[in-house]
Every structure is written in structure tokens, then in C-alpha cells.
Amino acid sequence: MNSGRAMPLLLAWTEALLAAEAPRIEIFTTARCPIAGATPAVEMYILDEPARIEAELSASLPQGKDAAAELAQAQVQGAWREEAQLLTRAYRGLLKAKQYGVLRLPAIVFDGTAIVYGVTDLEDALSIYRSWRQTSP
């Protein structure tokens, strides 16, 4: 067997095994309460984001109802498309938090079934989750 080819296969298998053992993690928090250790692989929902985005979008609207509606429509169809996508994602976080029954923030949800509240470091929350998994049947 060619040992040069075996090493990448072994690394790929090990990475796949580790990924299979890693829980799916979703973080629910606010802009004022950042979570340390979050990586791009973690779904992060900032639940006060919808209010911030809406305030930002409405700040530049004119006072007249018709003029504001026209400007809003033009902005949503044009340059504000990205903000609309951000707003959609922000509201998705609120809906998921309600689905999971999140009662307070910050909340870190593992595999959609276990919630760790009040912890602002992902590694600490992961340790709590793993301890719970080892002791629960």
C-alpha cells in the first residue's frame, strides 16, 4: 500500500468521524452579550437584530406615507436587498428560539434538543452539554 495516499484518506476519515460526533450548535443571544469561541460552523442568531435593522431601514424614510412607501419599495428592490435578507435571517432566529422554547438569553442549543442557558463561552457550554450527555440515559 502506498503510504503517501493512505495519509490523506486517514485524515479525511478522522475528520468525518469527528464531524459526525460534533453536535449541531445554534446560539441565541443579543448584540450586548457576545459568545466567545463561536466559529462559522455555529449558527448564531442575534435576537435583537430585527429591531436594529428595522430602525436602520426606517431612519432614512421621508415623513409622508406615500413617499415613504415609494422609497421603501425602491430600496427593497435595489440596494437594500441585502438588508432584507439580513432581516429575514434575523426573524428566522426569533422563530427558531420560539420553536425550541428558549426562555432566556444567552441560550446555546445542541442538536435541537438540549439548551444551555447563561453561558457566554462556547467551550464552557460544550463541556456542560457533554457532561450532561454522559450522565443522561
Image (cartoon, rainbow, N blue to C red):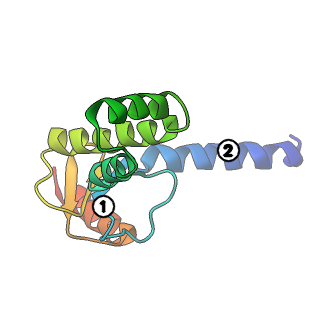
**Spatial CA span between label 2 and label 1:** 24 Å
The residue pinned by badge 1 equals 130
Asked whether 135 or 116 is in front, the reply is: 116
Frontmost residue, 47 versus 124: 47
Q: Is residue 109 above or below residue 34?
A: above
Name the spot of residue 101 as percent of width and height, x first. Answer: 12, 45
Q: Position of residue 29 (x, y in %)?
A: 28, 60
Residue type indicated by callout 2: Ala
Can you see residue 27?
A: no
Q: Which quarter of the rendering shows the N terminus?
A: top right
Q: Is residue 79 above or below residue 40?
A: above
52 sits left or right of 5 in the view: left
Q: Quadrant of residue 122?
A: bottom left
**Disc 1 secondary structure class:** helix
Q: At x 37% / y 68%, what residue is drawn?
A: 35
| Residue 2 percent across, percent down from the top left | 89, 42
Residue 64 seen: yes
The residue beneath circle 2 is 12
